[in-house]
Amino acid sequence: MYIVFILVSLLLLVGFFVLTSYETRRGVRFFALQRERLDRIVERTEFIVENVNLGEFLRDEVHHLIGRIGHDIVHFSLIAVRLVERLLTNLVRRLRTHPIVDEAPRETAREFVKTLSDFKGSLNATHPEITDIK
């Protein structure tokens, strides 16, 4: 198994030397645009690794991310509060313009009045009216 990896590596190394010698003799690069783009990416990555303090950069990015998450949470909370406010405002407006009418059955009200009258009468019967004596 290891011999396969060794042979593949040697084959790739020989292919690299053959390709570079061919390009040197002809003065033409294969896949020139893609290789130049890759060279720029590698140079930029190398510059960043050498010159940027990654710890400070990471701390700043985490600080920015936490601030952004906090902002989004507050924004969504405000949207929810405004939604509830609108619903309650519409409900109050509807209740003020269309008051609820008590449509209880008339018989129940009459029975209640009759019961109160009977109770009042029984109170008068058990407690006679006191008149002022002068």
Image (tube, rainbow, N blue to C red):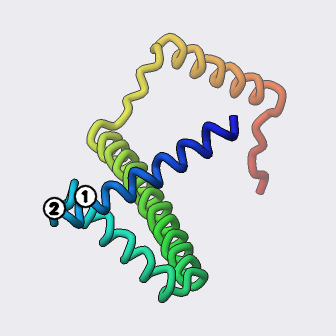
Residue 18: give x, y in percent of width and height. Answer: 34, 55
- Where is 115 relative to 78, above or below? above
The residue tagged 2 is: 26
Query: Which image quarter: residue 28?
Result: bottom left
The residue tagged 1 is: 22
Q: Is residue 47 left or right of residue 9?
A: left
Disc 2 from disc 1: Cα separation: 6 Å
Farthest left residue in view: 27
- The kind of residue on which mark 1 rests is Tyr
- Where is 71 relative to 83, above or below? below
Q: Is residue 89 left or right of residue 112?
A: left
Query: Which image quarter: residue 117?
Result: top right
Q: Residue at x 20, y 64 (%)?
A: 25
- The kind of residue on which mark 2 rests is Arg
| Front residue (pair 39, 121) | 39
| Crowdedness near tag 1: few (<14), some (14–19) or many (≥20) residues, C-alpha within 10 Å | some
Answer yes or no: do the residues labelled 2 and 1 have beta carbons within 8 Å?
A: yes
